[in-house]
Image (spheres, rainbow, N blue to C red):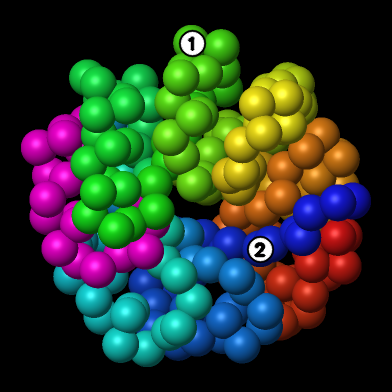
Amino acid sequence: MYFKLKISPSLLAADFGCLADAALEVEAAGAETLHVDFMDGHYVPNIAFGLDLIPALKKRVKIPLVSHLMISNAEERLDDFIKTGTDYIIVQEEAVTDLNEILKKIRSNGIKTGFAICPDRPLKEVYSGLNNIDYLIVLGVFPGFGGQKFIEDTLFKIKEARDFMTKNELTFDIAVDGGVTLNTAGKIVKAGANELIAGTAIYGAGDIKKAVQDFLALG
């Protein structure tokens, strides 16, 4: 492997009564970033987290926070998320009117930017957006709830993204979210992903530190 494998635990799978402790535990275990899903009950049926969570976490952890906006009105709420001090803002590519404009606005505010793409969405339709990102999330399940089974066809999209990046001499992280377990992670990494977003496979493990280290050992 010619890239460093990174782990981004998904806070959605943590104990909501102990979120700061959960963030600190994975940071100490070697996680590179912390993934925070914001869900509005509209774009997805689930509801998760409020804006105040980001500044609260920033007081406790040093690793970058990735705000994944799984919401239907990301353009309307973008300024609010920018003000939180988050390190990354990731939008759902099909849920915004002008993907490239929103990516440009995020970056102009000194925040790393990117988008997530659903399993049924062809990557070729958003090739132009790949030229303007720091972070791509290839969703291995349909968004909304954790614990779903990984969709195997996602592997082709991961490889397509890696090939596009190499061919065009671009540099961005290729992360995979949804269905990431120790059983699926090896083929995900082999397909070209360099960051694994794992929720229940980490926070549902008996030993969280060991779970993070087991994923890192795949690199």
Q: Residue at x 10, y 37 (%)?
A: 76
Q: Residue at x 79, y 67 (%)?
A: 216
Answer whether residue 72 is magenta in the image. Answer: yes
Judge from the rendering whether residue 126 lies leftward or rightward of residue 103; answer left or right.
right
- The residue at which mark 2 appears reads as 7
Residue 50: x and y in percent read 20, 61
| Front residue (pair 126, 94) | 126
Amino acid type, mark 2: Ile
Tell me which segment is drawn in magenta: 70-89
Answer whether residue 76 is magenta in the image. Answer: yes
Residue 34: x and y in percent read 49, 67
| Front residue (pair 166, 64) | 166
Amino acid type, mark 1: Glu
- The residue at which mark 1 appears reads as 125
| Front residue (pair 20, 78) | 78
Mark 1 and mark 2 lie on one chain; the one further toward the N terminus is 2
Q: Residue at x 20, y 66 (%)?
A: 84
Give SS at disc 2: strand
